[in-house]
Amino acid sequence: MRYPDKILSQVEKPARYTGGEWNSSRKDWDKTKFHIALSYPDVYEIGTSNMAVGLLYETLNNNKDVDCERVFMPWLDMLRLLKENNLPLISLENGRPLKDFDAVGISIGYEMTFTNILTILDMGGIPVKASERTDADPLVIGGGSSCYNPEPVADFFDMFVIGECEDLISSLIDRFLSCSTNGRLDKKKFLLAVSGLPGVYVPSLYRPKYHDGEFDGLEAVDGAPLKIRRQIAKDLPFAATHPIMPYIEAVHDRAGVEIARGCTRGCRFCNAGIIYRPVRERPIDDVMNAIRDCIDHTGYDEVSLVSLSSGDYSKIDELISRIRHEYGDSLTVSLPSLRLDQHSLELLESLSASRKSGLTFAPEAGSEHMQRVINKYIKREELLETSSLAFSKGWTGLKLYFMLGLPEEEMEDVQGIVDLVKAVQQTGRSRRCQVRLGVANFVPKPHTPFQWEGQHTGEVLTAKHDLLKNQLSRLNVKINWTDTDISVMEAALSRGDRRLCEVVYRAWKSGAVLDTWSECFDFSIWKRAFEECGLDLYHYAQYKRTTDMVLPWEHLDMGISRSFLLRELKKSHDGELTDDCRHGCNGCGLTKTECPMIG
């Protein structure tokens, strides 16, 4: 089916729901054996830019027996019209309701999309709770960076893939087909069969325990493993070179080629730095081939070289030189996630001979004390020299990202941000350069050295915000803030146990939807949902756990040892730095087989 014109003519952006884009794949439904709908649970412009979804889409559709289609979260106008006209949410390729698929795969990149997941399932004709589904309903599979603590949404998923799924795909499809008879899956048989695969977590095979109101571990049943080891791809998978070309502007309207995965810097607040270890680099010839293929299949004139720390790619200078030699100025190259140093500036200079509008860097902390706490030390002199050099070479603006509410942070550390911004601004004052700030509130994330820490209270965060605003507003420094209420919710959902499934469900039933969008987020709905469940929202967000407590995500083994995380936690309190592991192994727990850097 397709949505009728009378529906599409009433929505703000009809192209969100029509499909048919260049490089999309529309297969014959009846000639394929396995049908899966992929989703990133946000609106089309964000979901279609997600590299994980694009990679899986291309990988799955390269299998002639698999039909992979896409579905994203409708915006409010379309959501209302679907409900008023009793229409289901359908896939972009064949226009099939989600209930017709064998599986729905959801890439979870942010905790505040949890209620969107329930909306997508419900509007697609699928019971939102796994316990209410039958063998006739699709499998609901979760993955992505925000399911490394999947407990707050465990009741809504049949299974999760923990880690990198590229090496698992064929095994999962084979087991699905072997556990099916006349097109009907024996779901219990399948889930038992896959529960022993590396990286597969089946929530129904685990029972949570509680003691004195606190989570006290999971009990495995039916022979399920006590620990689920993160799946790690030894080598980077092929680069997706046929990205879908949207009819409307996407968030990332350019080609993207992943040049490396993982990071060696060891920032103690950073969840990605843990869950994507170890560093694996794509060979430079493969990167060049991927760039050529992307350009040939899209017509883009801009490519982003994607990595958690692009400047750390070991052959970045050679790569930039080869791109420039082959394409000259006809191809714009962007390097996200660069450190604020002169090498990064030299790279950007080589890429931007003419366009020099703004630079973006993330010091995260303003004082040396806090930089040592978070293990992201940048010498003040080097930072100021870099900003001065950038302004002298014609860059007109600099945006700096900082984090407030980090462990060990005092008001003088916040004052350190003010002092640093003033000094940076002074380096560009003669040229009337603009300095802007992006300020986020610290959210303690699972599997990091700060996983035991709590979030600062709203009163403390507000006082720190006020200090920045009062002093920097006089200097004409523009500041963008993360809403404190959203940060509280993100912290609670990041750190939660399985009891939060009912909170998510009640919030959704009460109208919580599209919570990542400020015009849609209603904090009162979430507070009421916590109260109705007899749970304390602020306890989940702000409680500082002791290191002997069982954490809701401890059954998921990232390959990073508990002793390493505790060692890093102690070093943060002592203000002691840990060197980049490119300079020597820090003993994080990965094996020699898993990490190519271990000699």
Image (cartoon, rainbow, N blue to C red):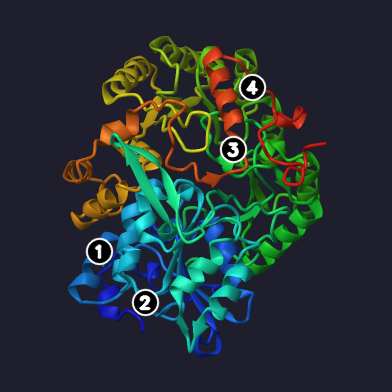
| Coordinates of residue 418 in the picture (x, y in percent) | 44, 15
Considering the numbered disc 4 on the image, is that residue within a helix, a strand or a loop? Answer: helix
Quadrant showing the N terminus: bottom left
Whether the residues at callouts 1 and 4 have beta carbons within 8 Å, the answer is no
- Amino acid carrying label 3: it is Gly
Mark 2 vs mark 4, CA separation in Å:
55 Å
- Amino acid carrying label 4: it is Thr
Q: Nearer the viewer, mark 4 or mark 3?
A: 3
Specify whether residue 353 is in view.
Answer: no
Q: Nearer the viewer, mark 2 or mark 4?
A: 2
Depth check, front residue: 247 or 185: 185
Residue at 77% in and 38% down? 597
Q: Nearer the viewer, mark 1 or mark 4?
A: 1
Q: Which residue is mark 3?
A: 273
Q: Nearer the viewer, mark 3 or mark 1?
A: 3
Q: Earlier in the sequence, mark 1 or mark 4?
A: 1
Q: In the image, 39: left or right of 394?
A: left
Q: Which residue is mark 1?
A: 77
Specify whether residue 41 is in view.
Answer: yes
Is the residue 201 above or below the residue 438 in the image? Answer: below
Q: Earlier in the sequence, mark 4 or mark 3?
A: 3
Residue at 79% in and 54% down? 326
Mark 3 vs mark 1, CA separation in Å:
38 Å
- Amino acid carrying label 1: it is Asp
Q: Which residue is mark 4?
A: 386
Q: Which residue is mark 2?
A: 99
